[in-house]
Image: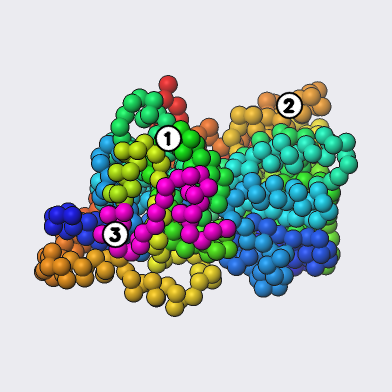
Amino acid sequence: MKKEQQLDLYYQMVLIRRLEERGAELYQAGKIGGFMHLYIGQEAVSTGLIAAREERDRVITAYRDHGVAVNCGISANEVMAELLGKATGMSKGKGGSMHMADVSKNMWGGHAIVGGHLPIASGFAIGDQYAGNDNITICMFGDGATNIGYFHEALNISKIWNLRVLWVCENNQYGMGTAVDRASAVTEIRQKAEGYGMKNGQVDGMDVTKVYEAAAEAMKYVRESSQPYLLEIDTYRFRGHSMGDPERYRKQEEVKKWQENDPIGIFNKQLLDKKVATKKVLDEIEARVEEEVAKAVEFAEASPEPAMEELFTDIYAD
Amino acid sequence: MAKITMREAISQALMEEMDRDPKVFIMGEEVGVWGGTYAVTKGFYDKYGAARVKDTPIAENAIIGGAIGAAMVGQRPIAELMTINFGFSAMDYIVNQASKLHYMFGGQFTLPMVIRAVGGGGRQLGATHSQTPDAIFAHFPGLKVVSPGTPEDAKGLLKSAIRSNDPILFIEHATMYQVRGEVPEGEYTIPIGKSKIQRAGKDVTIVTYCKGLELSMKAADELSKQGIEVEVVDLRTLRPLDMEPVIESFKKTNRAVVVEEGWKSYGVGSEIVSRIYEEAFDYVDAPIIRVAQKEVPLPYNRTLEQAALPQVADITAAVKEVLK
Ligand SMILES: Cc1ncc(C[n+]2csc(CCOP(=O)(O)OP(=O)(O)O)c2C)c(N)n1
Ligand SMILES: [Mg+2]
């Protein structure tokens, strides 16, 4: 990666972190409602992954989608506005935290039914194959989602039909409060691809550089071979499953241990050690992010509520 | 009489039945270590252990299908759907299997199982997580559908459901766990398939259930201050449907409003209104009005979501309209 790109990834990761920290505050203040699933701790996953995609490649993910939205180029303003349910959000305030999408940026949404979007990702690839397009689809989902039938149906069809899908499992060790080994027959999720004769790999998701490299290689394989690939990215969510999680299922020591491997801290150190940037440069990036987030909050708070007529728009296209 | 919350009432019913019958066990997502997404089974995992409080993978088909199988071989599983919206992921098991197997195999075996599911909107969870699809499930013969509106009914009906030999979908409302109400001391059950007059009145009959009951009782209080006395009939069970108290009430008031949280089209209200016309046409003094959700998927934005959901004011307006 070039220096500029590395600094940009650093910027994206810090932006996701600060945006969500402010989001959590606004949630506590009652300005955001519904379910809100924070990505804090997992920023390196989508940041490294999306950095390796080409713009024509489609991205689809689950409800833990704020980070992916930012990585795909959706502005902090729009993310914050959608969280506040404002008309200026990318889903006009109708979707909320779990449903961020901007198809003009090939971000095809956060989806809230666990595993439900996997067959849809196969569908993107079916559509693209049918049209003769040479892009790929990147489909992200959690470890918990690999235990539902949707996952298995989607993987199987992607293999028999030579679909260009990069399946990306974000293994953050838990599906809500259920640890992977209590819910999944194999704890290395990538092994599930073996049953479908699908190429697969695994990478440390706390190191954005490693994620980027593994993702770039996997995408190259999917693109060139017209075969699906399952990439497992191991990570950890530092916060609760969603806001208001009593977290009875894990010990604070475990959380602390993972927090020592903070993906932003790791990358910060790498950039300094490899002399890609000075502390001053990184501090400037952080200051720029603070300002951008403050502006996003201002923008979102000042934005109008969706008009009452919006209740009845977009139900049908015709 | 003790005053307890809906959450406590449901929790007590589960615990009493688990204590009474070792065949009863619970399986679902986050029912154990987490203590239930809505804290209904808090403490159960420690009390009964992993064999009777089974944390499942996220696999709705395996949950409902698994409960069916376990019931067929003689156990009394309580399968929990974290929300009724995830019931769509297990629709085949609910519709094609649970509702049919007893009949199709000539009654050779029974399906003594309960599916507990949380439904309802109003929590800004967006279109896929906020539905009140009760009417769809009530469409299928072979499945019983219960949806209580008070803690007393929730406890008594759930206990009956657990003891029943039929598959029963037991629908709770996500915004009602804190609702408080009087519950009889000691052991009691309430029969499934019996509607109940929750408030007596003479001017208009309101037919409703679950969240609609909460709203209708508030509307009744307001209307009473204005000199209008409504009679509130709570269906409590959608299938089998007990129309007797509804028809009796209607013959007295000759006017009715049906209140439900789900969509109006093809909804519970459609069924109730048809039945009234079929069974008491000669008593009709005014067109019956249905109060229901606006015909849109529920949006995240709070103001829009509340505008789409039926409100107390919609009910009072409807009552005044049928009195015109
Ligand atoms: C079909 C379905 N079942 C259950 C749920 C409730 N639910 C939402 S998130 C979640 C856990 C998902 O875990 P995982 O796939 O590991 O993703 P993570 O939250 O860890 O990112 C559950 C059970 C749902 N949304 N959809
Ligand atoms: Mg997970």
Q: CA distance from mark 3 to mark 1?
A: 27 Å
Q: CA distance from mark 2 to mark 1?
A: 53 Å
Where the N terminus of chain A falls, by quadrant? bottom left
Local secondary structure at mark 3? helix
Q: Is residue B121 visible?
A: no
Chain letter behind tag 3? A
Q: Amino acid at mark 1?
A: Asn
| Disc 3 crowd, CA 10 A, few/some/many (<14, 14-19, 20+) | some
Chain letter behind tag 1? A
Nearer the observer, disc 3 or disc 1?
1
Local secondary structure at mark 1? loop
Residue drawn at (44%, 78%), measured in percent from left and top? A253
Q: Which mark is residue A162?
A: 1
**Residue under pointer 3:** A210
Q: Is residue A224 visible?
A: yes
Most foreground residue, B252 or A98? A98
Q: Measuring from the top left, give residue B267's x and y in whole percent.
A: 65, 33
Q: Which mark is residue B274?
A: 2
Most foreground residue, B137 or A312? B137
Q: Is residue A203 magenta?
A: yes
Local secondary structure at mark 2? helix
Residue drawn at (31%, 38%), measured in percent from left and top? A224
Q: Which residues are magenta?
A: A185-214
| Disc 2 crowd, CA 10 A, few/some/many (<14, 14-19, 20+) | few
